[in-house]
Image: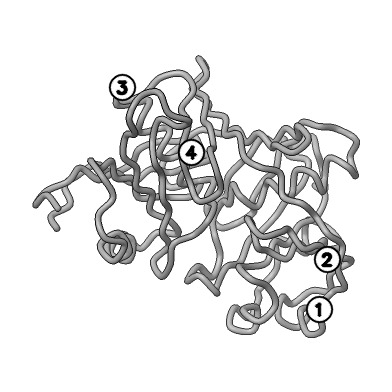
Amino acid sequence: MPTSLRIRIVDAFTDRPFAGNPAGVLLLDAFPDGTWLQDVAREVNHAETAFAHRLPAGGDADWALRWFTPTTEVDLCGHATLAMAHVLHTTGAASGTVRFATRSGVLTSTAHEDGTLTLDFPTAPLTATDVPDGIAEALGAEPLLAYDTGRNVGDLLVELADEKTVRSLTPDHKDLIRHSERGIIATAAAEDPSHGHDFVSRCFFPRVGIDEDPVTGSAHTALAPFWSERLGRAELTGLQASARTGLVRTELAGERTLLTGRAVTVIEGELFA
């Protein structure tokens, strides 16, 4: 690897620094050994670090993209994809619509004149399931119902009684590990939609080294169909009620879900490795 690489920290699904979900972003000439990528993600120590390199012209995708938490590589990540798209567009490395080759197939991002970015992701297939024994104790609240979100997302989605319950959760993160493949999405309808959001959520991923994710784009591929069916609208806005908070606009388009948000670069520097 080169002795010096440009690295950026980007806050995604927000229009201001120190909110949304921070992601490390590195543009490479090619992917080195996965151990090096994992070491960098561990050093960055944000929920995800995204790595990308340009692909030859004429193929199905423009850039190859991978995501790593501090402990593992993941199949799908929304906020780090938004962060990567933001860097590509703000640095002039890409314009318009960008196609990413990923472990979840080809994903696209589209930049708009108002500064927002829209991601085109696969909609998570929701399957109703029994509320697991013990999850109420692990979360600190009794779920009304539960859904499996399929292989790409790998979470258990649970609906809680109301927005206040979601905001006040103090889960036992170690106990949550045994209840899903990746993590838990806790959600409820907005108490007052006039405040600018239709539903709230919080996401817990201790199995992959993230006790609580500030804003989770991939989870909204499950939240979009869940709430669109209940609220009768294809276009919604979700508030992820973490300490940092963030807004994700969703549009359900059958087997695809469009996720729209903003991002801001907060740190830019050199990685010596």
Above or below residue 208? Residue 223 is: above
Above or below residue 62? Residue 21 is: below
Relative side of 167 to 267, left or right: right
Q: Which mark is residue 82?
A: 4
Q: What residue is shown with label 1?
A: 132
Q: What residue is shown with label 2?
A: 146
Relative to the observer, which residue lies in front, 245 or 65?
65
Relative to the observer, which residue lies in front, 114 or 119?
119
Residue 215 locus on image (x, y percent): 56, 51
At a point 72% along the width and 32% down the height, the residue shown is 251
Q: Disc 4 on helix, strand or loop?
A: helix
Mark sitting earlier along the chain (3/1): 3
Q: Check disc 2 and give the amino acid type.
A: Ala
At a point 13% along the width and 55% down the height, the residue shown is 272
At a point 68% along the width and 66% down the height, the residue shown is 184
Relative side of 120 to 157, left or right: left
Q: Which mark is residue 92?
A: 3
Q: CA distance from mark 2 to mark 1?
A: 8 Å
Which quarter shows the C terminus? bottom left
Q: Disc 3 on helix, strand or loop?
A: loop
At a point 71% along the width and 81% down the height, the residue shown is 138
Q: Disc 2 on helix, strand or loop?
A: strand
Q: CA distance from mark 4 to mark 3?
A: 15 Å
